[in-house]
Amino acid sequence: MLRIEDLHLSFGGIKALQGISFEARPGEITGVIGPNGAGKTSLFNAISGFYKPDRGRVFFDGQDITGLSPDRRAELGIARTFQNIALFRGMTVLDNIKLGGHTRLKTNVWQALRYFGAAQREELELRRDIEERVINFLEIDHIRKYPITMLPYGLQKRVELGRALAMQPKVLMLDEPVAGMNREETADMARFILDVQEQFGTTILLVEHDMHMVMDICSHIVVLNFGQQIASGTPAEVSGNQDVIEAYLGAAA
Amino acid sequence: MINGNLKASYAADERVLNNTYKQTFVYGMMLALALFAGFANDYMILIACKMGILLIAVVGVNILTGYTGLVSLGHGAFVAIGAYSVTMLENGLTGIVPESLTIFVVLPLAVAITAVVGVFVGLPSLRVKGLYLAVATLAANFIVIFLIEQDAFAPWTGGVVGINTHDANILGWVLDTNREMFVLIAVVAFVSLLAAQNLIRTRVGRAFIAIRDRDYSAEILGISLLRYKLTSFALSAAYCGLAGAMFAYFYSRILPEQFELDLSLELVAALIVGGMGRTMGPVFGVMIIVMMPEVIKVFAAYFTGGDAASARYIAPLQEIAFGLLLVFFLLKEPLGINHITDRILRAANRWPFARG
Ligand SMILES: Nc1ncnc2c1ncn2[C@@H]1O[C@H](COP(=O)(O)OP(=O)(O)O)[C@@H](O)[C@H]1O
Ligand SMILES: [Mg+2]
């Protein structure tokens, strides 16, 4: 579904990614782990099109998307969340999630100015879809009209997941979805991620600092350290790998 | 408002006039405008026409600046392009298209031309923001006025001395009085405002707001910055072009100097005073901006007993007041009058249970 080939990326002297290659298989949850500064977020930014890699390619559904802009990649079906929540803070939960529906809608400027007719039908259909498939699913009915700024951190993370889900993505990339959450919130989020995979068959790419969650829900794990891919495999393989134990677990301990 | 969680019907929830205050206000306004057209005196009609024309333009600036977050100090140029396009097209089509039908050709064409120019003026917004974009649009304003004033184009534009305009002729109804023009301007302004409100609650408007609030988030949702920034420029230019068309039909002569920086600043000032990124912001802003100089004139006449020598203080007084008003709103009420009315409505909504 999503294949990364020999990706290299540097910022001046810093080599953020050095030869990353792996595949996120359809319908599976693939984890990307590594200590802080390992290059996980940089990898996401390269996949979503914000950073241009120095070398290497990104394939989506067999298509080379390395040269596409972020919005074109989103249109193809790649959704993501950000490590430091990137919601529209002035808007309500509902409006944020509606924005997730952008690429699926067709209303043009002319129809939008008139509203009645095509635009109205599409808006009501979007609303119904979001209510059922996102708001009920993520159990955020009670806050749909709240502005983002009024929500606690954990709920904001959930709304950002909701906005990504509204895109009906084929690939969902989550950058540290449980960072800064307490245990209960973490368990909730893990359950939602598994539900997304199960109910919608979405291919998920998960960056996480929290090893336990990754080991629990991922079927395949890629380990980064200082921009290098030091291991990849099943949770069991990775956690038994000597390099990983030294680099990652050693650093964390 | 408060228990907005009832989802009895999404259609009801998605309505624009979703509470009785808004409904009463809008229907009340429509009634008031109709009565106004019939009973207001000539002076009031004149002021109201000025407001209506400016309103159409400010609604356009609101789309660009208020909703998309792109600053322009050059929108006076689009009003000019609308006004001159209408006039030059009317001249060009005389004898070709029947007079009673010309407006149906000329008006859409003038608006379309302005929109296309808007796209070109918007190109810098793909690279720069804020102050740099403001300066780039300002430059566009100078260039447009400069071109209109060129002697080489004077046979068509009239050059620096301006050009006589045509009266609007709608299927044989010649709008040759201010009162008749008021009816047209009021209808056009009302529809403009309604269309802008429609835009904002659908896909296109949401994309604008997303770009304003966080542009990389917008991209990640599949919103093309290129396409939507240029769309926003085109739309806001189109509104200003429409305002310019009304301007040309309203006044008997247009001059290039009427569309210079002063006008561009007035448009932005009205938006700041009224409230950016709010539907009613332009309405409140335009009322204040148009009314203030008139109020000063009346006061000055009252205090000086109307003596002719004092008249020369009026213009500087008006400009000082304009400046002070802007400073006051920027410092004390940056969200504009719309924010004040919000507070009043909220308080009214809660009464008598609590104070808002
Ligand atoms: N935009 C940038 N400019 C310069 N350096 C960057 C930028 N983004 C990331 N880096 C650097 O790249 C390295 C990897 O960072 P990052 O991808 O954020 O790591 P992680 O998400 O794994 O914590 C770090 O050394 C970081 O400082
Ligand atoms: Mg990171």
Image: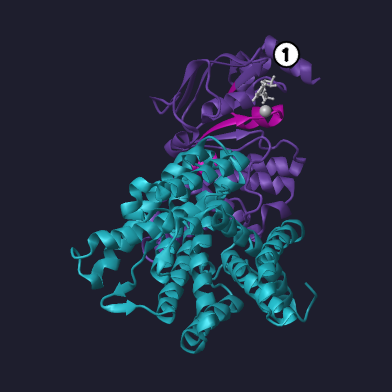
Chain colours: A purple, B cyan
| Residue type marked 1 | Ala
Nearest the eye: A156 or B220: B220
**Residue bounds of the magenta highlight:** A195-221
The residue carrying pointer 1 sits among few (fewer than 14), some (14 to 19) or many (20 or more) residues within 10 Å by Cα, namely: some
Residue B118, percent across and down? 43, 48
Residue A14 lies in quadrant: top right
Q: Which residue is mark 1?
A: A247
Q: Quadrant of the C terminus of chain B?
A: bottom right
Report if residue B45 lies within the magenta region. Answer: no
Q: Is residue B89 shown left or right of residue B329?
A: left
- Give x and y (percent) for residue B187: 43, 74
Q: Residue at x 54, y 40 (%)?
A: B136
The picture quadrant where one finds residue B331 is bottom right
- Residue B94 vs B120, above or below: the answer is below
In x, y percent, where is residue B28?
A: 54, 83
Which structural element holds mark 1?
helix
- Residue B171, above or below A250: below
The answer for which chain carries disc 1 is: A
Marks counted in the figure total: 1
Lateral position of residue A21 relative to residue A87, left or right: left
